[in-house]
Image (tube, rainbow, N blue to C red):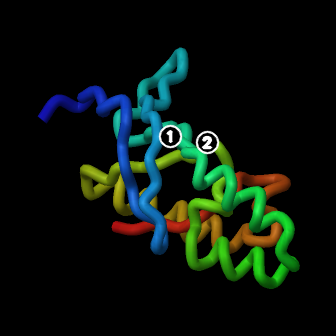
Amino acid sequence: MDEFQEYPPMLTFRLGLSYIHAHAELVDTRLYRFPHVIKATLQHNAWHRWVARAVAWLPAPMQRLVRWIWSHYGLPDRVILKKLRKPEHIEAFTNEQAMYRRLATAQGSLVPRYYGGHM
């Protein structure tokens, strides 16, 4: 399989009970291309935009419940996805998950927020 395979421009992934549709592009820096790291720009239809506005009017505990059940409403417009193809990717991702757990109090301010992983 080609290491630098291009991803389809649109992808669907599942997080919790939500099926999320996004525009995908590879993370590419000037020095290195990361073929297993995808920057996904979420696609919001009219229903999702309406529900997101309605959820904002709920009390904070209800907002957290809705976002826990339907994760789509708690995500930012762009997220990073990692496709684990090789054993070294899995080992590195396991370590990354552990670091995010250790840095839980700093998420969203000093480090990006970690929304979960699935291998």
- Residue at 40%, 68% in the rendered image: 118
Pick out the residue farthest to the top.
30
- In what element is the residue under mark 2? strand
Which residue is denoted by mark 1 in the rendering?
40
Q: Do tag 2 and tag 1 residues touch (Cβ < 8 Å)? A: yes
Image spot of residue 82 (x, y percent): 42, 49
Which residue is denoted by mark 2 in the rendering?
78
- Left-right relation of 7 to 67: left
Q: Is 91 drawn above or below residue 8 in the view shown?
A: below
- Left-right relation of 79 to 76: left
Image spot of residue 10 (x, y percent): 37, 36
- In what element is the residue under mark 1? strand
Q: Quadrant of the N terminus?
A: top left
Q: Residues within 10 Å of mark 2 (few under 14, many from 20)?
A: some
Q: Quadrant of the C terminus?
A: bottom left
- Left-right relation of 60 to 100: right
Q: Amino acid at mark 1?
A: Ala
Residue 112 marker = none
Q: Report the front residue among 44 and 1.
A: 44
Precedes in sequence: disc 2 or disc 1: 1
